[in-house]
């Protein structure tokens, strides 16, 4: 008696029908659209310093599809407005955390560094600990070779002039080779 599994029409060992032989068996891709939830998720990730490509990939979207969606209509402007709102909320929440840390809320003790950081951000000229670039109001004059020579002459005095001659005096060796090979006692 033949095995019923191998003779069934759905068996993988059975040859495919002639009409379906040209079509490979593939699963249809789900068509994903960018709804309000997806757009807000991308905005949240971008507010956390990811770029749009990374955010789309992290959420399972094609970056090309995201940029194509953004290019249609006024989606780009709407996205920028929404992204600005999310960034403002994120900055506000981070500042609130720093202020809470400076006040000691929910902590064993206050952290003075949080308050010092807020001061350095609020007024960098007076409270920043990092080096601040100094703006030069006047352009510095260029020093020419002649001006540089005047300054060095004034500081160190004029340089003495040294003449170097290019002549070389050549002396002939004595013809007596025995006297040249003798060693002195």
Image (cartoon, rainbow, N blue to C red):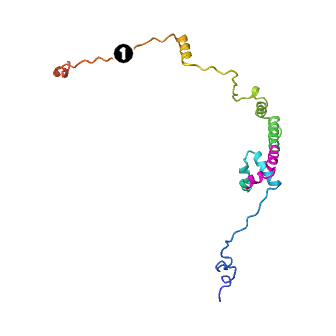
Mark 1 neighbour density, 10 Å: few (under 14) some (14–19) many (20 or more): few
Q: Quadrant of the C terminus?
A: top left
Answer left or right for 56 relative to 173: right
Q: Nearer the viewer, residue 132 or 107?
A: 132
> What's the magenta bit mostly, secondary-structure-wise?
helix
Q: Residue at x 83, y 35 (%)?
A: 103
Q: Nearer the viewer, residue 12 or 171?
A: 171
Q: Residue furthest bottom?
A: 1
Q: Is residue 29 above or below residue 129?
A: below
* Residue of label 1: 165
Residue 111 % position (x, y): 78, 34
Q: Is residue 166 above or below residue 10?
A: above
Q: Residue at x 69, y 81 (%)?
A: 9
Q: Is residue 14 above or below residue 70?
A: below
Residue 106 % position (x, y): 82, 40
Q: Quadrant of residue 38?
A: bottom right
Q: Is residue 132 above or below residue 64?
A: above
Residue 150 % position (x, y): 55, 13
Q: Quadrant of residue 169?
A: top left
Q: Quadrant of residue 180?
A: top left
Q: Residue at x 80, y 48 (%)?
A: 79
Q: Is residue 95 magenta?
A: no
Answer left or right for 14 relative to 172: right
Residue 170 % position (x, y): 27, 18
Q: Quadrant of the N terminus?
A: bottom right
- Which residues are the magenta region? 65-84
Q: Is residue 74 magenta?
A: yes
Q: Nearer the viewer, residue 173 or 87?
A: 173
Answer left or right for 54 relative to 96: left
Q: Nearer the viewer, residue 33 or 77?
A: 77
Element at badge 1? loop
């Amino acid at each position: 008696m033949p095995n019923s599994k191998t003779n069934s029409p759905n068996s993988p060992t059975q040859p495919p029908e002639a009409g379906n032989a040209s079509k490979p068996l593939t699963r249809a891709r789900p068509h994903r659209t960018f709804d309000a939830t997806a757009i807000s998720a991308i905005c949240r990730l971008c507010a956390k310093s990811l770029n749009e490509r990374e955010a789309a990939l992290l959420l399972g979207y094609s970056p090309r599809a995201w940029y194509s969606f953004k290019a249609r209509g006024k989606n780009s402007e709407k996205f920028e407005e929404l992204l600005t709102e999310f960034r403002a909320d994120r900055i506000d929440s981070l500042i609130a955390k720093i202020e809470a840390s400076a006040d000691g809320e929910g902590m064993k003790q206050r952290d003075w560094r949080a308050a010092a950081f807020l001061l350095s951000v609020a007024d960098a000229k007076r409270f920043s600990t990092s080096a601040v670039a100094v703006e030069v109001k006047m352009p510095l004059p260029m020093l020419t070779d002649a001006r540089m020579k005047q300054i060095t002459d004034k500081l160190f005095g004029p340089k003495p002039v040294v003449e170097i001659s290019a002549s070389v005096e050549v002396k002939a060796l004595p013809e007596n080779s025995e006297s040249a090979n003798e060693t002195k006692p």
